[in-house]
Image (spheres, grey):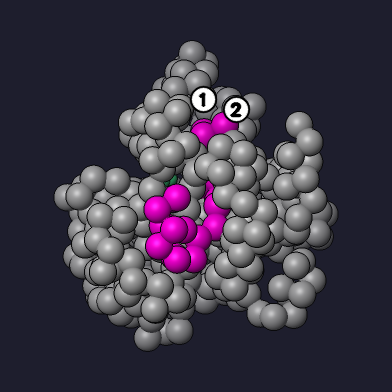
Amino acid sequence: APWLEFFEKFPRAELHCHLLGTISRETFMDLVRESEAPVTEEEVNEFFTRGEKPVGVLRIFRALEEHILKKPEMLRRITVEHMASAREHGVRYIEFFWNWTGLKRHFSYEAGQRAIIEGLREGEARYGIVGRLIPSIDREASPEDALELVNEMLAHPADETIGLGIDYRETNHEPENFWKAFLLARAAGLHITLHAGEFGEHWRNVETAMDLLGAERIDHGYTITDNPALMRHARDENVIFAVVPTNSYYLRTFTDEEWAIRHPIRAMKRAGLRIFPNSDDPTMHHVNNAESWRIMFEFLGFSLEEIREMLVNSIDAAWVDEETKIRWS
Ligand code: HPA
Ligand code: ZN
């Protein structure tokens, strides 16, 4: 595919990617065996064919947390493998979300962080791709769990750990419940991003993320299109949206023809918001970073000039020093 090759050639940043959403089917199978998890080969195959739906992905994440990812070493392996794969598709800099709350039954924050950082350093040495970490609040867990996560981050600081995020199911789990965790992280100088406004009636979560919790970036953010005044505000505040063209909700809700025309990403760009595409859960969405850029061009109809603006956005949005940016941009 010529356009895919074209997009693979750009040195790019991937800033919205969940570590658990990068596991290959083969590694998943190995880890199931290694942990003697009560998950069958058929179930794994089903995960990887039905994973387009968000509930599907989140269910897989829960199985991983509960039954499979019992050793920090497994996180190191997943990290290195995705560093290799991302680099192959042109990614030079990547920020990974990782959730510790669901894994704390198996190991400490410190042990998990250490294993992932080992993976980042190995990936950089072997493939020349730079990686950073964003521990992420599990919004289906409690505000106390979120505070515990931030306290662990502050007790075990690392150069690679640069910010705080929040993910998992948005409905009925409002971001303001976690205000103390975000306040503490901001006071410690950490960057802030939130998954907000993924679908449903949730534009207010985007407002809360920006105006109350100090988000510099928003992951998804599509429902902001229901509120033009809020879009103008986001534009004035220079917030950058790490969007996902393959977001499963819209793939599932629209037909192919509708999707290309009605995808909220188009309305966001039209309103002057700063956006750029990401892969989110690449192996589970059957996408890679280069494909997410190609989809913006070939299916969502953005021009090469608009794509160029998005490249600038992705570089500006990266939470890394200028020297490192120059190395990969
Ligand atoms: N939304 C919320 N939580 C997630 C996602 C997502 O798209 N991917 C992985 N965890
Ligand atoms: Zn996400």
Residue drawn at 53 percent across, 42 percent down: 300
Q: Quadrant of the C terminus?
A: bottom right
Q: Amino acid at mark 2?
A: Arg
- The image shows a total of numbered marks equal to 2
The local crowd at label 1, few if under 14, some if 14 to 19, many if 20 or more residues have their Cα within 10 Å, is: many
Q: In the image, which residues are magenta? A: 265-286
Report helix, strand or loop for mark 2: helix
Residue drawn at 45 percent across, 66 percent down: 272
Q: Quadrant of the N terminus?
A: top right
Mark 2, residue position = 25
Residue farthest to the top? Answer: 42
Report helix, strand or loop for mark 1: helix
Q: Mark 1 to mark 2: distance in Å?
A: 7 Å
Residue 168 can be seen, yes or no: yes
Q: In the image shown, does 223 or 103 lie closer to the viewer?
A: 223
Residue 57 counted in the magenta span: no
Which of disc 2 and disc 1 is earlier in sequence? 2
Q: Please give left or right for residue 192 compared with residue 141 in the image.
A: right
**Res. 4 mark:** none
Residue drawn at 73 percent across, 47 percent down: 7
Q: Please give left or right for residue 169 compared with residue 133 in the image.
A: left
Place of residue 240 in the rendered image (x, y in percent of width and height, measured from the top left)? 47, 67
Tell me the mark number nearer the camera, choosing from 1 and 2: 1
Q: In the image shown, does 212 or 232 lie closer to the viewer?
A: 232
Place of residue 73 in the rendered image (x, y in percent of width and height, measured from the top left)? 61, 47
State yes or no: discs 1 and 2 in contact (Cβ < 8 Å).
yes
Place of residue 77 in the rendered image (x, y in percent of width and height, measured from the top left)? 65, 45
Ligand 1 under 8 Å from disc 2 Cβ: no
Mark 1, residue position = 48
Residue drawn at 63 percent across, 56 percent down: 307
Residue 182 can be seen, yes or no: no
